[in-house]
Image: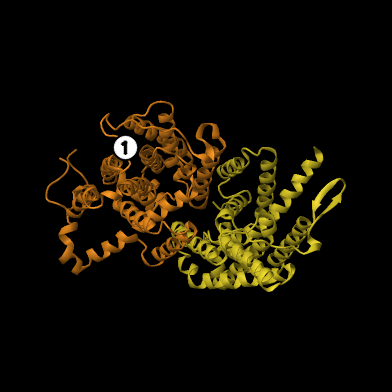
Chain colours: A orange, B yellow
Amino acid sequence: MAVTSPGIAGAHQYLDAQVRWRTIEIVFWLATLLPFVVTPDYLVLASQIAVTALFALSLDLILGYAGIVSLGHAAFFGFGAYTAGLISKWGWGEPLTGLVISGFAAGLLGYLMSFIISRFRHLALIMITLGFGLLLLEAANSASGLTGGADGLQGVKMWPLLGMFKFDLYGRTAYWYALIVLFLLFLVSRRLINSPFGLSLRGIRENAVRMRAIGAESRSHIRKIYTISAIIAGVAGAILTQTTETVSLGVLDFQRSADILVILILGGAGRLYGGLIGAIIYMIARDWFSGVNPQYWYFPIGVLLIGVVLFLPNGVLGGLAQIVNSERGQRWAGWLTSPLPWRSRP
Amino acid sequence: MITSVFGVLFDGFAYGMLLFLLSVGLSVTLGMMNFVNLAHCTFGMIGGYVTVTLMNSWGWPFLATLPVAFIVTALISVVFERTMFRHLYRASDLDQCLLTIGLVFVSVATAAWVYGTIQQPVQLPPYLRGSLQVAGLTLGIYRIFLIVFALVVTGLLVAALEFTRFGAQVRAAVDNQRMARGLGINVDGAFAITFALGSGLAGLGGALAIDIVGLDPSFALAFLVYVLIVVAVGGLGSIGGTFAAAMLLGISDMAGKYYFPAIGSFLIYLVMISLLMWRPAGIFGRRT
């Protein structure tokens, strides 16, 4: 079977080019190490940014690539967070296994949900995800014997990471931990998106009916990516629990689902770095304004959302890409975004 | 036991009426333009604040503020529709959601800034306070007023949609927008007017809701979920469906909170998800 149609060869070439690393990506990941040197007082914030970025990445997989709008993604984040908290409360404070179990638990929930999710689109889908998120929030609130209810889960104690690194007050271990997990799961997502599977997801996003007509299994694809996204969201929640050693109902809040949507859209959905950039901008801005009444904090966020929808439909990264892809942009910054000569896979 | 059942039914019915007023406009505009307007409850909040301002700062009587709440909200909504929303009728669900939720955030912050985050007090006139004893039941006068008022509005609405030329145009546009355009109906114009009327009704609902659920800046977000449930369960563009769904939600919410206080709000969401899974287009919805 040496004969491949030109269409398939073209697709493989495209994927090959996508898989290669670019200078700007390497610069970006090196820059994530800067907080250790430049702003060592802000490592706690940095670790929260990494958690948020991971959560945004999980939403990007379903929203940006498969086109599944979710107003209740905090359900998986919160489920992972509570699982991690409960494991530790019940006497097993080892972070890495806790992380794996939490991710697995959230993934299981996502897998069950995916059977419902893959059947609906449009308003019904938005309402079901929203209702499911609120359902889980109410359930956690009612089951106060298990979750601590509105008081939050007490008694979470984490053992040192790998038996050596204690989670300190300055967030040094926390940031290392969150950053490494973020980077590893980013690599997985990057590989996933630049695979034939990732391409068919984009096909489903653009036209689900046509994808089915050309023989692509859209529902099982949606189930897969939804489960993967739930795992990543659960891991993000678990890191938050493990690094802060508390869980509150806020992890399941509608506000959190809405925030993460804002973050992703702000950065640019459908671009792997969108959620990461969005998380950095949003969290730093919120830290600056943290003294202000949270009700006022809504104002700039709302203006930002309206502005992004009306004037910057592809987010900050989309706007930047437009500049770089222009003729002048190519001359000045083209080297940053062109694929590096070496290949990352055989 | 029986009296408590009737008491809960009555309260739930009144609450359902409120939900109906708040959500009927969204149902019709969603059915017409497929525009997901999450900012609908913002208009309800505006109506509430208009009433509060007129009563507390200018000393207007409660009943006189209601038409003003309706008109002011309708006018403000038309400004939003003409300047922002109409650019997004062909955009994706997601863009519509984001723009309107952005608007909700801005309105919540603005309300918090102007009025503070406290609950707004409202002093009802004496003839709307107190309660009546009917056959062993204690019925709040304000709730009776609310039910009668909402039923009259519903009657007017149904009559306007069924028996006027404008109503026929709106129904045609809800059924099949492209066909209606093809027949020469000015769908954009009809939509702008419907949008204003629907938002005005939400404003009215917001004003009437103050005494039952209170009014603070989180109103626009807190009621959004209820309104969306009513619209999604009732089916887009269906007044009867919206009415049935509002009653169902109002009564089951009251009953849930009264009889199962621990899992009351849990039940609502469970009912909604099951209904939507059974009929994704809503109980009375025709389109999927």
Residue at position x 47%, y 46% from top?
Answer: A72
Q: Where is residue A302 in the image (x, y as percent from the top left)?
A: 45, 62
Question: Which residue is at the front of the view, B247 or B14?
Answer: B14
Picture quadrant of residue B237: bottom right
Judged from the image, the secondary structure of the residue bearing numbered disc 1 is loop
Depicted B59 relative to depicted A71: above or below: below
Q: Which residue lies furthest to the right in this view?
A: B135
Depicted A335 relative to depicted A238: above or below: below
Q: Position of residue A258 (x, y in %)?
A: 45, 52
The answer to whether A80 appears left or right of B58 in the picture is left
Question: Which residue is at the front of the view, A242 or B92?
Answer: A242
Quadrant that contains the N terminus of chain A: top left
Q: For the residue carrying disc 1, how many other residues have a C-alpha within 10 Å: few (<14), some (14-19), or many (20+)?
A: many
Quadrant that contains the C terminus of chain A: top left
Q: Which amino acid does label 1 sit on?
A: Phe
The answer to whether B198 appears left or right of A250 in the picture is right
The answer to whether B37 appears left or right of A288 in the picture is right
The answer to whether A102 appears left or right of A26 in the picture is right
Q: Residue furthest top?
A: A91
Label tally: 1
From the image, tell me which residue sits under label 1: A167
Mark 1 falls within which chain?
A: A
Q: Position of residue A71 (x, y in %)?
A: 47, 50
Q: Position of residue B32 (x, y in %)?
A: 57, 63
Question: Does any portion of residue A119 appear in the rendered image?
Answer: no
Residue at position x 69%, y 50% from top?
Answer: B247
Depicted A127 relative to depicted A327: above or below: above
Picture quadrant of residue B142: bottom right
Question: Does any portion of residue B59 appear in the rendered image?
Answer: yes
